[in-house]
Image (cartoon, rainbow, N blue to C red):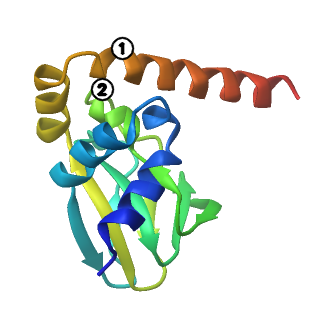
Amino acid sequence: MARRSDFLNHLAEVSLFSALSKKELGLVARRAEDVRVEPGAILCSEGSAGQEFFVIVDGKAKVSRRGRKVAEIGPGAAFGELALLDRAPRNATVTAETPMELLVLGQREFAGLIDEVPGFARKLLAGMARRLRESDAKSVQ
């Protein structure tokens, strides 16, 4: 099982959480669940409503769209953060290729943080702005 400091390090790399302090990252980590899955487990399905966000602590997963593999992701990768903000359909399927350890944060737990921690939402917006800028820069290239 990963240590708490490992979780904080992984969370700090997520663009959505990039503006949070270590203390605030600790609050996120405490509300998240440490989950282990076996190869073949479907972590999220394209087209289904999202309810949670994932950070890969250990292992590898395949990302597919319309049944076609588009990427492979591993430790430190995060996906599903938009599901924390709304329940729009997932834009990809993510399937475990190896045994995996994940940090999983549900929409309900995330909403509680926004309601309980002053300034949390403002910092999340800063992180989202950073992510949008990065995405925009990639689309121009």
**Residue plotted at (67% across, 28% down):** 135
**Residue plotted at (59% across, 24% down):** 130
- Say the numbered circle drawn on residue 22: none
Q: In the rendered image, which quarter contains the N terminus?
A: bottom left
Q: Nearer the viewer, residue 68 or 92?
A: 92
2 up-or-down from 12: above or below: below
Q: Quadrant of residue 3?
A: bottom left
10 up-or-down from 122: above or below: below
Q: Residues within 10 Å of mark 2 (few under 14, many from 20)?
A: some
* Total tally of numbered discs in the picture: 2
Q: Position of residue 72 (x, y in %)?
A: 62, 66
The residue under label 2 is which amino acid type? Leu
- Cβ–Cβ under 8 Å for marks 2 and 1: no
Q: Position of residue 40 (x, y in %)?
A: 38, 80
Q: Position of residue 30 (x, y in %)?
A: 18, 53
**Residue plotted at (44% across, 65% down):** 56
Q: Earlier in the sequence, mark 2 or mark 1?
A: 2
Q: Quadrant of residue 90?
A: top left
Q: Quadrant of residue 96?
A: bottom left
- Say the numbered circle drawn on residue 122: 1
Q: Secondary structure at mark 1?
A: helix
Q: Nearer the viewer, residue 121 or 138?
A: 121
Q: In the rendered image, which quarter contains the C terminus?
A: top right
Q: Secondary structure at mark 2?
A: loop
Q: Nearer the viewer, residue 65 or 106?
A: 106
The residue under label 1 is which amino acid type? Arg
Q: Is residue 61 left or right of residue 130?
A: left
21 up-or-down from 139: above or below: below
Mark 2–mark 1 distance (CA, rounded to whole Å): 13 Å
Disc 2 designates what residue? 85
